[in-house]
Image: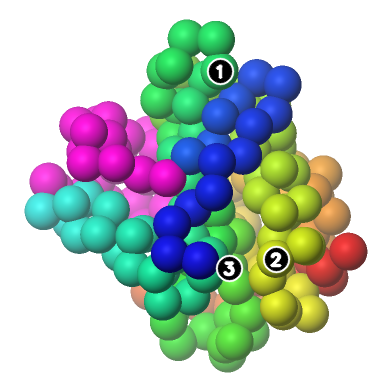
């Protein structure tokens, strides 16, 4: 698979990134509140551009990657979610796809992350050859931990990533 398939839920369309998403992605990744638990540093325009290119590369090379989360009714860009391989040097992530999600403030508290990730996990269960999926979450990010637990992830190990405490979660494939 060289490009993300389009997935649909009751409220969302999950679709491949396009060049036209660059402005929305820049806004998302430049927001200090959004990145507070994801590295803590807003990203500049070049870093966001390279991020979008990496997403396309993951689909091309790995057969999985990230999707844009779009609101079905309005077409609004809400964030990104999917599976990645980030080669972070965390032993528990080696050879296992990493689930991830990031949403803009307009989508917080609405169940959007859970809805998007459930569609992605259903897709992954059918299309990704791996015994489990994992994710990493800042132990202070209660909202993302809640989402992960609702999706069937459980805490596997606490570690350090980039000098910050990080919790690795695991979800066996269904």
Up-down: is 165 above or below 50? below
Up-down: is 73 above or below 150? above
Up-down: is 90 above or below 17? below
Mark 2 → mark 1, Cα distance in angstroms: 24 Å
**Residue 115 image point, x, y percent:** 70, 34
SS state under label 3: strand
Mark 3 → mark 2, Cα distance in angstroms: 15 Å
> Which residue is rendered at x = 44% and y = 16% of the image?
75
Q: Which residue is mark 3?
A: 98
Q: Which residue is mark 1?
A: 72
- From the viewer's perspective, is the residue at label 1 or at label 3 nearer? 1
Q: Quadrant of residue 136?
A: bottom right
Q: Which residue is mark 2?
A: 127
- Picture quarter with the C terminus: bottom right
Considering every residue shown, the one lying at the far right of the view is: 174
Considering every residue shown, the one lying at the far top of the view is: 74
Q: Which mark is residue 58?
A: none
Q: Which residues are magenta?
A: 16-45
Q: How many marks?
A: 3
Of mark 2 and mark 1, the one earlier in the sequence is 1
- Badge 3 density bin: few <14, some 14–19, many ≥20, Cα 10 Å: many
Q: Describe residue 45's horizontal placement relative to residue 61 as left or right.
A: left
Which coloring applies here? rainbow
**Residue 60 image point, x, y percent:** 39, 70
Front residue of 32 and 151: 151
> Which residue is rendered at x = 72% and y = 21% of the image?
10
SS state under label 1: loop
**Residue 122 image point, x, y percent:** 77, 51
């Amino acid at each position: 698979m060289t490009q993300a398939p389009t997935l649909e839920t009751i409220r969302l369309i999950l679709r491949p990134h396009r060049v036209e998403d660059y402005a929305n992605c820049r806004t998302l990744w430049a927001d200090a509140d959004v990145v507070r638990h994801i590295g803590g540093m807003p990203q500049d325009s070049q870093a966001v551009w390279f991020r979008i290119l990496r997403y396309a590369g993951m689909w091309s090379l790995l057969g999985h990657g990230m999707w844009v989360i779009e609101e079905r009714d309005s077409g609004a860009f809400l964030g990104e979610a999917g599976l990645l391989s980030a080669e972070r040097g965390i032993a528990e992530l080696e050879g296992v796809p990493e689930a991830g999600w990031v949403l803009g403030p307009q989508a917080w508290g609405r169940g959007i992350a859970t809805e998007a990730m459930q569609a992605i996990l259903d897709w992954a269960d059918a299309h990704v050859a791996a015994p489990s999926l994992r994710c990493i979450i800042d132990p202070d990010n209660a909202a993302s931990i809640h989402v992960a637990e609702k999706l069937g992830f459980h805490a596997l190990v606490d570690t350090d990533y980039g000098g910050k405490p990080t919790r690795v979660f695991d979800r066996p494939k269904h």
